[in-house]
Amino acid sequence: MPFKVALVNMPFGFHIYPSIQLGTLSTLLKTEGWEVKCFYLNLHFSHQLGLPVYNQLCEKRFLICEWLFSQSLFGDLPKNKEYINHFYPYIQEVCQSLGWSREFLLEVKTKTAPEFIDWALDSFNWSEYDVVGFTSTFNQNLASLTLAKMIKEKYPSIKIIFGGSNFESEMGLEYFRVFPWVDFAVIGEAEYVLPGLLTALEKGGAIPRGVAYRKRGEVIFEENQQVFLDFEKYGAPDYDDYFEQLKQINPSSPLLENPIILYETARGCWWGEKLHCKFCGLNALTMQFRAKAAVKVRSEIRALSNRYNTYRFRMVDNILNIKYIDRVFGKFAEENYDLKFFVEVKSNLTKEQIKTLAHGGVNVIQPGIESFSSNQLTEMGKGVRPIQNILFLKWALYYGIDVSWNILTGFPGETNEDYRRQINIIKILNHLQPPKAVGEFWLERFSPYFNNPEDCHIEIKGPGEAYPYVYDSEKINQMKIAYDLEFETRNQIDPALKKELLMTVDQWKERSQAEKNPFLFFMKSMDFVMVYDGRSKGEPEKTRFIGPQAWIISFCNEAPKSLRQIKDHIQEKGGTKENIRDAEKIIKSLEDKALLFGEGDKYIALALPYNSHL
């Protein structure tokens, strides 16, 4: 009989959709002939805590989810016990948002979480399986390691395998070294590695590269240099076990109605191959961009929609393949489907590209805007300009796409002027979608800032603040397992400017949620343009523009235009030599009214067109 494989998804993996890791591996291993069962134990714990509470916890910082599962593994070690006091203000904020007391939070750590691990050990017949594999991503590491330890103690013959983003590179090797009950760790992509490992365990033979294992007490590991390219070999992710187990827990669960399906179209980052964004720690060893054929993407989305009776998809790609805009979403638009997608893109898209995505079903988009400061964007290596970020927000709003974005600060070399410039820009954009938050960037492992800190004028001070309190063990080198790290730059930013930026964004967010939210749009007639400006807190203004002013507003609507292009357009519209000569003065008058935004020699109109057919 072939090996039987159990794949486990532990808390605090998101419960609102199935795991792309388990779904992908289930398809992979079944295609190769193994018997696979996925265990979504995070579903059980999320229902035990309550879905809204669990969902909030998944988003919390300072490794609080890991700390909640640290009791069984580390016990009452000094720093672990001190966590709740060290992070007192944050704990208070978390408890308030959850409607919990500190005492109840402690009870979850010391009683509820350990009891859940005991339940997970005893409620399933793990002895049926030859291999139990754990996916470990973000805040599910300690829950996974703890259950794995208990399974290994109870069933010593079972082989325990770990993989996932927490086991990338040096992090995975350190975890593997410290926790001896993990028999094998897949470091990197699994497709070219895991089948060979299972074959070696089942039939004998060499352990493939890309797998950490022990030989006479010594950790052995050779890096796998291959990147996965054979997308055609395997089908869409297999999420059957997720929905079967969800139905068993709650047959009337709202998660069963039009569920969110995770789907991967590509790996790596085509922009990162050209210029790796300096703060980005994604694609540790797999930056090379690889994408499925568009016809396969359309076919698999069709299959997943049909199989799981859904219209909603969340693309997990780091960046959208530009070719998919026409070849995937353009095709969906032609068929007028009611599919809905979340995608991540680069913010330099054109109006027509945003239109195609919207008509093809994209309703939530993450463009990585990050800033309206040219200096900061250049420092980040984003490869976009503020004017492109503004244009993106304008047309996303026009086409009804919800934009998920943040403003990041704290980058080396930023100045007070960067903050002042950004604040001034924000004040004229409150008719557009505000950021979700403002905050300093995290120093992430694998990022250029991490790899070359001195060249980037960064001093790394140690692991992220929470690691010593959560992974409280002298056996662990916390600098090797930390994904985020503490650091300092040479910046000397006026605290008043930081406060003003936060306050300005907070006001933007508040007004966007108000009953009378800000607006800025224009209506175009044959001989004039009427602009309706409701950005201020006072009465909205209506202004009629004729001649060159009207022509410029309309001409700069869809894309940035240069001064030369604007002058040529005035001439084409029959403008006088004086109009052309005064073009810069006219542009300046529109900038002063915050109706035109200029950057270098390019200008865009900030008002949205009233016409709904563009």
Image: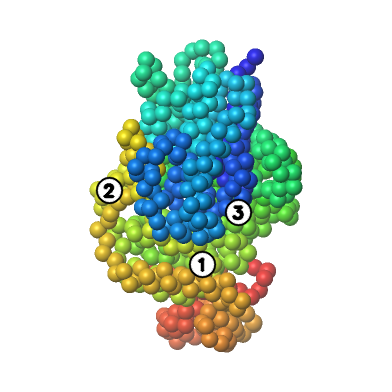
Q: Residue at x 65, y 48 (%)?
A: 260
Mark 1 vs mark 2: give the one in front: 2
Task: Say if 405 sits above or below 560 in the image.
Answer: above
In the figure, is residue 297 to the left or right of 269? right
Contact? badges 3 and 2 (CB < 8 Å): no
Q: Quadrant of residue 564?
A: bottom left
The amino acid sitting under disc 1 is Pro
Q: Residue at x 34, y 42 (%)?
A: 78
Q: Which residue is identified by label 3?
A: 52
Task: Say if 403 sits above or below 464 in the image.
Answer: below
| Mark 3 or mark 2, earlier in chain | 3
Mark 1, other Cα within 10 Å: few <14 / some 14–19 / many ≥20:
many
Q: Measuring from the top left, give residue 337's x and y in whole percent.
A: 73, 53
In the figure, is residue 486 to the left or right of 12? left
- Quadrant of the image containing the C terminus: bottom right
Q: Which residue is identified by label 2?
A: 461
Q: Quadrant of residue 399?
A: bottom right
In the figure, is residue 63 to the left or right of 259? left
Task: Say if 524 sits above or below 303 in the image.
Answer: below
Q: Residue at x 47, y 54 (%)?
A: 102
Q: Residue at x 63, y 17 (%)?
A: 2
Q: Which mark is residue 434?
A: 1
The amino acid sitting under disc 2 is Lys
Tag 2 secondary structure: strand
Q: Measuring from the top left, give residue 73's x and y in whole percent.
A: 44, 34
Regarding residue 347, the answer to whether it shows in the image is no
Q: Nearer the viewer, residue 453 or 524?
A: 453
